[in-house]
Image: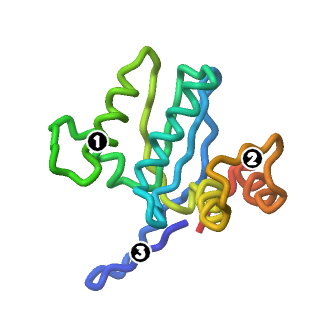
Amino acid sequence: MIVALGSTNKHRVVRHVRWYPPPEGCIKVNVDGSSFGIPGDAAIWRGLQRAWDLGYRSIILESDSQTALDLIADTKENNFHPHATLLSLIRKFISLHWVVFFTHTLREGNECADWLVKLGDTNADSLKIWTTPPPQLDIILLEDIFGALRQ
């Protein structure tokens, strides 16, 4: 639940945040918008590439970086943007024969991706694949299974 208090408005705005599983026949790729020196939207490229390589053709890509999603959705070519090459690659990649939906979530609805990015920042491996989730994610995953609302 997100509570915001305006300076002139004393009403409480409550926003319930949770992770939603994808519909049947679709996978969800959650990426984190933090960068740690690497462009945050590169996680989007890597997530799409991995899903494609594994043969998935119906994808929901969820990111907590609205900025990255807006840059991808912007159809104007801006060759002077610092990430113009990467944005062009992502746009070409999503034009392949598959269905890709982009959605935004708040950080509270993206806790597993956030935790994994932080772990990756402290690890020298360029790619780590688990056959079972790391035990540190057990509580977060159980909360996701039961639809727990985040604060």
The residue that label 2 is drawn on is 145
Amino acid carrying mark 1 in the image:
Thr
Q: Amino acid at mark 2?
A: Ile
Image-based side of 31 in relation to 87, left or right: right
Disc 3 marks which amino acid? Ala
Disc 1: CA contacts within 10 A as few (<14), some (14-19) or many (>=20): few
Where residue 59 sits: x, y (%)? Answer: 52, 29
Which residue lies at the image location 25% right of the left edge and 54% below the top edge? 82
Residue to which mark 3 is pinned: 4
- Viewer-nearest residue: 71 or 130: 130
| CB within 8 Å, label 2 to label 1 | no
Instruction: Categorize mark 2 by other alpha carbons within 10 Å: few (<14), some (14-19), many (20+).
Output: few
Q: Is residue 102 left or right of residue 18?
A: left
Q: Does 92 appear above or below 38?
A: above
- Locate residue 151, reporting x and y percent: 59, 69
135 versus 83 height, above or below: below
Secondary structure type for disc 3:
strand
Q: Which residue is mark 1?
A: 85
Who's the residue at 35% across and 22% down the image?
95
| Res 149 visible | no
Q: Picture quarter containing residue 53?
A: top right
What is the secondary structure assignment of the residue under circle 2?
helix
Residue 85 on image: x %, y %: 28, 41
Quadrant housing residue 94 = top left
Residue at the spot x=65%, y=62% of the render? 115
- For marks 2 and 1 on the same chain, the one whose residue lies earlier in the sequence: 1
Instruction: Judge depth for marks 1 and 3 and give the one in front.
Output: 1
Q: Earlier in the sequence, mark 1 or mark 3?
A: 3
Residue visible at 43% across and 14% down in the picture: 97
Gap in Å between the C-alphas at discs 3 and 2? 27 Å
Relative image position of residue 33 (x, y in whole percent): 46, 57
